[in-house]
Amino acid sequence: MSMIEEWRPVVGYEGWYEVSDQGRVKSVERIVPNGKGGTKRMKAKMMTCTGRESQRYLFVTLCKNNKVKRFLVHRLVLEAFAGPCPIGMETLHGDGGPYDNRLVNLCWGTKEENSRDKWLQDSMPHGEKHSRSKLTADQVRAIRQDCRTHNEVAQSYGVSKSCICMIRSNRNWRWLD
């Protein structure tokens, strides 16, 4: 079964770029100044979506009137198909994760909804998966059972006293049993 891809103008870049309900971005064929007083025809082409592991989302770089700007692809899709972002809302990615920019995977939602979705989809690094974590889950469990002072425990694990306090009061690692 083939699905027809729907294309709409990128908001603010009408006549320059279009975005599809499948999360793809393309430039529009157009006539532009050539810098020598004449004009030239720019062919339509698919834009390359860029993103690295350190960046959570894909983006494209668009140019208009010699001004270059980077846009998150998911924002372009939602703005073109669902309208402007309501005040206090942000983009939510569904089960497809942060690199799935199809319209069916996107919607506007609150920051709280977004955080909950990231947690449920395991796309929000926490615990040992977090890049700045100094402790393992087993160490956290041991810290909670340790009867020594915050200072003594902190020194033995190479972390701060406030870190131990946050763990023991369930403000950090609260999801851990």
Image: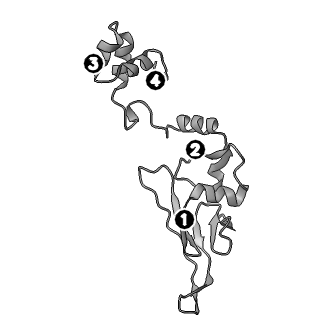
Q: What residue sits 42% from the left and 19% below the top? A: 167
Residue 42 higher or lower than 84, as above or below: below
Q: Residue 69, labelled with which disc?
A: 1
Amino acid under disc 3: Gln
Question: Mark 3 and mark 2: span between their CA atoms?
Answer: 41 Å
Q: Residue 172, labelled with which disc?
A: 4
Q: How many numbered marks does the figure carry? A: 4
Question: Mark 3 and mark 1: span between their CA atoms?
Answer: 48 Å
Residue 155 higher or lower than 4, as above or below: above
Q: Residue 155, labelled with which disc?
A: 3
Q: Nearer the viewer, mark 3 or mark 4?
A: 3
Question: Mark 3 and mark 4: span between their CA atoms?
Answer: 18 Å
> Residue 82: percent from the left, percent from the top?
72, 55
Work out whether mark 4 precedes mark 2 in sequence or the reverse, and give the earlier one: 2
Q: Nearer the viewer, mark 4 or mark 2?
A: 4
Amino acid under disc 1: Lys
Amino acid under disc 4: Asn
Helix, strand or loop at label 3? It is: helix
Question: Mark 1 and mark 2: span between their CA atoms?
Answer: 29 Å
> Residue 106: percent from the left, percent from the top?
64, 50
> Residue 69: percent from the left, percent from the top?
54, 65
Between 83 and 46, which is closer to the camera in this rendering? 83
Q: Which of marks 1 and 2 is in front?
A: 1
> Is 27 situated left or right of 136 in this image?
right
The figure's colour scheme reads one colour
Circles 3, 2 touching at the beta carbon (< 8 Å):
no
Helix, strand or loop at label 4? It is: loop
> Is 22 situated left or right of 150 in this image?
right
